Image (spheres, rainbow, N blue to C red):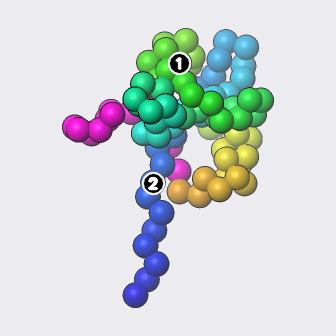
Amino acid sequence: MSEPKDPLTVVIFRKWPDGEILALFPGEPSDVVGRLCTSYQHIGQHSGADYAGCMARTKRATAAEYAPLLKELRQIGYDNLQIRLRWQPRRGSR
């Protein structure tokens, strides 16, 4: 019997006006009520983030721009990432 694969983790890479790259994990709540999703940046690392607010205040990051952050995420254990431009929750989630 083969080992089950880790589930995919949706990640959305965005760029702040100052150029800093942000990884949003919209399917990963960071608070008890699920209002905030998990996020990650080089500086500050894991944090909670308001998905809609971050999407409104940032721009899409290019693959070249987010490559260093993607490498860092893989080094800390994010092995099964699904990179998306936006996220639509499934019915009944969050």
List x then y, in percent, for residue 85: 46, 32
Quadrant (top left, top right, bottom left, bottom right) of the N terminus: bottom left
Q: Which region of the structure is painted magenta?
A: 81-94
Residue displayed at 45% across by 54% down: 8
**Residue 50 position (above or below residue 3):** above
Q: CA distance from mark 1 to mark 2?
A: 22 Å
- Is 19 left, or right, of 3 in this rendering? right
User: Would you call the spot at circle 2 few (<14 residues within 10 Å), some (14-19), or many (20 or more)?
Assistant: few
The amino acid at mark 2 is Leu
The amino acid at mark 1 is Cys
* Precedes in sequence: disc 1 or disc 2: 2
- Is 55 left, or right, of 41 in this rendering? left
**Residue 26 position (above or below residue 5):** above
Residue that numbered label 1 is attached to: 54
Residue that numbered label 2 is attached to: 8
> Is residue 42 covered in magenta?
no
Quadrant (top left, top right, bottom left, bottom right) of the C terminus: top left
